[in-house]
Image (cartoon, grey):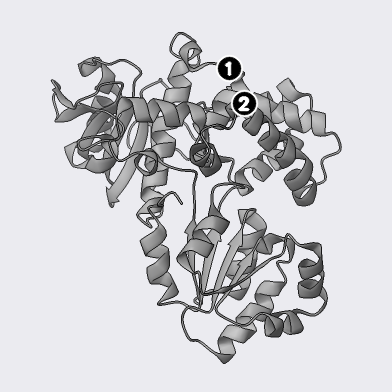
Amino acid sequence: MIARLQAEAIKAALAQFPVVVLTGARQVGKTTLARWLWPEATYVTLDDPADAAQARLAPDNFLRAHPTPLIIDEIQYVPELLRHIKMAVDRDRRPGRFLVTGSQAFGLMAGVSESLAGRAAIFSLPPLGVSEVAADGSTETSDALLWRSGFPELWQRKDLDRDLWLGSYVATYLERDVRQVVNVGDLRDFDRLVRSTALRAGQLLSYADLARDVGIAPNTAKRWLSVLEASQQIFLLEPYHRQHRKRLIKAPKLYFADTGLLCFLLGFRHPADLPTHALWGAVWENFVVSETRKHLLAASQRPSMWFWRTAHGAEVDLLVEVAPSAFVVVEAKTAERVDARAVRGVGELVEEYGASAVRRAFVACRTARAYPIEASFPAMAVPVAGPHGLLSEL
C-alpha cells in the first residue's frame, strides 16, 4: 500500500459525515485506499453485473443485504442508488455509514448534488503525486514520476512494462468507459481526438481547431472532450480575467491529469527523448500545474487555480489564490538556471493589478536547490518538490 496524502482527511470525514464520496480516474487507487482505510466495512462493487442488477431492480433489498458500514465501489454503474442511500441516511444520520467511489465524475456528481447535498463529504483522488512516490522530492523522483506516470500499480510493481500497461489502459478506457458515457460512433475518431488533445497540452483550447484536425464537428469535439474531463483524464485551467486596462484571453488551457499518460500519447518511448524535443516545455508545464493541483487536492482544498494572459502575449503560467485577489504565482521553465526574464509576465501582472496581488512568485524549474531571482519583486527559482520546493512553499 502506497500511503496517500488524502488518507487522514478521508478518515476524519468518515467520523463526521454519514456518506463520503471518493471520485477519480480509473486505476488511481480508489478501491485500494477505501478498503485500506475501512477494513471493517462491508465491501460491494457494482462492477459485478449481478450486484449491479440487484441494486438497480431492488435497491432497498440491496441495501438491507449489505449492512453498514458499507463501501460501494463503482457507483456510476447504478447512480439511481444514490437516492436510496439518501433515504437510508435520512432515517439514520450517524457518521461513517457509506463510502462511495466512482470513476465518472460528471454523472456521479450530478447524482450526489441532487441526493446527498449536506450529507456527504466529497474527495477527488488524483494519480500519485511526487511526494507520495518518494519523500525526498528530488529531481530524479520528479523525472521518474513525470515519465512512468502516477498510476499506483506501476509503482507497486516495478517489473511492469510501462508502455504495455499504458497502452492497455488507453484501449480499455476507450472500449469500456467511453461507450458507457457517450455514444461514440467511431472509436477511431475518438482515439484521434485523445491523441490530438495530447498535442494541445499546456495550450489554449480551441474546439474548432481540435475538431478540424480530427475531422469531426466542433460540437462533437466539445462533447467528447467533456468525456475526458468527466472521467478525470484531463482538466481545464480557466483564465483569470478581472480586467483593468489590458484586453485578456478568455479561452481555457488544457492539461492532462497524468504526465506519464501524456508522454505515452505523444509517442515518446524513452525519457531521454524529452529534453531535446519541442514539446518538452509543454510537458514540463503540464507536470508543474498538475502536481500543484494534486497538492491542493491532497490538502482537501478546492484548487483555486488560474492562468493569466493578455491579448498582447503577456502571460503567467499559474495563479494560486491564497486570499481574495491575492496569489502565489508560478512560472514553469525547463532550464536549471533562470533570471529575471523568467518572471517578465509576473512583472506585467503586478503592473496591472498592483503589488498586493502577488504574495509570492516562483519559477518551477530544473534546479536541485532553491535560489533567489533578482527582480523588482521577491522571486525564487525552486524545484517542484523537496524541502524548499514549490509544493512545500505552497
Using the image, determine if residue 316 lies above or below residue 132.
above
**Numbered tag placed on residue 392 in the rendering:** none
- The answer to which image quadrant residue 52 occupies is bottom right
How far apart are the two marked residues, 2 and 1, measured between alpha carbons? 8 Å
Using the image, determine if residue 200 lies above or below residue 233.
above
Whether pointer 2 and pointer 1 mark residues with C-beta atoms closer than 8 Å, the reply is yes
* Residue 116 left/right relative to 375: right
Depth check, front residue: 216 or 367: 367
Depth check, front residue: 376 or 89: 89
Label 2 secondary element: helix
In the displayed orientation, state which residue is furthest to the front. Answer: 159
**Residue 264 can be seen in this image:** yes
Identity of the residue drawn at 29% across and 30% down: 138
Using the image, determine if residue 156 lies above or below residue 91.
above
Residue carrying label 2: 163
Instruction: Tell me which amino acid carries mark 1.
Output: Arg
Label 1 secondary element: loop
* Residue 197 location (% of width, % of height): 63, 28
Q: Residues within 10 Å of mark 2 (few under 14, many from 20)?
A: some
Depth check, front residue: 32 or 388: 32
**Residue 200 can be seen in this image:** no
Instruction: Tell me which amino acid carries mark 2.
Output: Asp
Q: Earlier in the sequence, mark 2 or mark 1?
A: 2
* Residue 191 location (% of width, % of height): 74, 30
* Residue 36 left/right relative to 198: left
In the displayed orientation, state which residue is furthest to the top. Answer: 276
Q: Which quarter of the image is occupied by the C terminus? A: top left
Using the image, determine if residue 278 lies above or below residue 367.
above
Identity of the residue drawn at 53% across and 61% down: 22
The number of numbered badges drawn on the structure is: 2
Residue carrying label 1: 269
Identity of the residue drawn at 20% across and 35% down: 388
